[in-house]
Amino acid sequence: MKWQTREELRSLLINLVGFDSITGHKGEVHLIEYVEQELKALNYFKENPELVQTDLLDDGRKLLTALVKAQKPTKKTIILLSHIDVVGIDDYGSFKDLAFNPDELTQHFRTYHEELPNDAKIDLQSSEEWLFGRGIMDMKAGSTLHLSMLERAINEQWDGNILLLLVPDEEVNSAGMLKARETLNWLKQTEDLEYILCINSEPMFRQFLQDQQKYLYTGSLGKALPGFFCYGKESHVGEPFNGLNANLMLSYLNINLELNHSLSERVGEEVTPPPISLMNRDLKEHYSVQTPLTAVSMYNVLLMRQAIPTLTKQLMDVMKRTKVQVETHVKQQAEANGYQVNFDIKLLDYHTLYEEAVKRHGKELVNKRREELLKSRVHGDRDFNTLLVQDLAFLCKDLAPMMILFYSPPYYPAVSSEHNLLVSKVANRVSQVLKDQYSYEVKTLNYFNGISDLSYIGYDSNKESNLKELYRQMPLNEKEGLLKYLEEDIDVPSINIGPVGKDPHQWTERLNIDYSLEQLPNVLADAIKFSFKKSLIVHVKKLFL
């Protein structure tokens, strides 16, 4: 075996991090090809080459599956899920050339430790080993652990099948996992599998800066990406009160939305992080002294049990408050300068805007313009989504000024297996093992708060109402296939058992090697073997309920 000792795992991890697998870059494909070659070099897959497969996404990227079957035939299968893509490295600045070389980057920080924030400096100087690098925590450590578990399954012959699933694109659109839903259902039929559990190994996320608590997660937060399209009234800067600047409208929206705790959701002791802007700009293509006519902002909003229609209502309420503030601001400033100005800002959602455009111009013309834009599309999902909103707004310019609410991809359903008997037993087992063997106190949370691909494999209690609302309010809807994958059911209970790291998506991203590659592998292997044994008991109990 070659992926079992601490040093072997460390070497594998360094190799995986070495791939520039930034989402959308060629490194995503190269890393999958590397893992495929490594797996096919194992004797088990030399004898069973058909059990290692790659599946192409529409854009040429690949996902990988590798199935290890139990010696005694069984349907029972555990999925080991991880993503191989990472976010960009511009934040590393002058040493971004070292971002994918953990040993050299960590040594650089040892030499120039004054560059580090205090928290990272303390870790670097501690008795434990910490390695720095892009993706080392999020989540190539998880992929490393899962490859190790696959190898153990080959050699130890566990009481069930292990299916390794590596996907690209988790950090942007989760196109890899959306495609994997089809792949998993196909494998289920062709290999006659029963998925009893999906184990993800995203890293633990701290709840606050000095948090030392160990966590397990029995689900994953949902995510919506609402957008706000502001359409003002253009004017020359020399006559500012003859128009309404779209940037002013957006400014008040941002004040009312950014970090707004009233838009956080609370379930028991768990609270979602508040909304935060991921895009904020006017849509002028060139500089001029004409005020910006249109502007857009998109917000990351995290969900647990709240349904999308409820969120839509809350966001429309925010827009109502913003409308009053903007109108009052302009009126007061105009009066102070000796003008009389009264604007009436219209508030619409995307569906209402579409109906207004159809009312004015007919469904045939509106849909024809949409199809023409689709044929000449050069923008990414979010920019093109905005373009579709803008085109409808131009058709309804008589309504201006106006603010329009819409949704953009990606959408992540909130999922939780908190009430699943097997997941509860596995969580209790892992907590007990970590306490007995390593003296760690572990807390189980219902939702992983970093957003993950588990959203696309678990049960969404609000699926019907959520999809209905998204089809109504997302310009890129079922015709373009961004939601079609969610129509197909795939309900697998899940748990996240992950490594310890800090500062994901920051230049100080780092992994605790002692815990993650020395202690956790044994804990993860025990959890898998325990799951197979307990799954039969859980099944028998269900039969008698």
Image: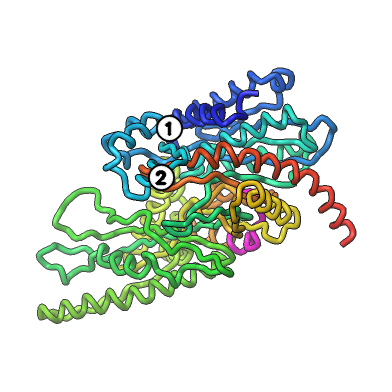
Q: Is residue 398 left or right of residue 42?
A: left
x 72%, y 22%: residue: 44
Q: Secondary structure at mark 1?
A: loop
Magenta run includes residue 248: no
Query: In this orientation, which residue lies closer to the viewer: 490 or 208?
Result: 208
The residue to which callout 1 is attached is 25
Q: Is residue 480 visible?
A: no
Q: Position of residue 309 (x, y in %)?
A: 54, 67
Q: Which residues are magenta?
A: 455-467
Q: Is residue 112 visible?
A: yes
Determine the image quadrant of residue 50.
top right
Please say if the residues under marks 2 and 1 sit with CB atoms less than 8 Å apart: no
Q: Secondary structure at mark 2?
A: helix
Magenta run includes residue 463: yes
* Circle nearer the N terminus (2, 1): 1
Q: Mark 2 packing: few (<14 Cα in 10 Å), some, or many (20+)?
A: some
Which quarter of the image is occupied by the N terminus? top right
Q: Specify the amino acid type for callout 1.
A: His
Determine the image quadrant of residue 156.
top right
Q: Position of residue 356 (x, y in %)?
A: 43, 66
**Separation (CA) of disc 2 from disc 1:** 31 Å
Task: Give the number of the disc on residue 123.
Answer: 2
According to the image, what is the colour scheme of the structure?
rainbow
Query: In this orientation, which residue lies closer to the viewer: 300 or 291?
Result: 300
Query: In this orientation, which residue lies closer to the viewer: 438 or 485?
Result: 438
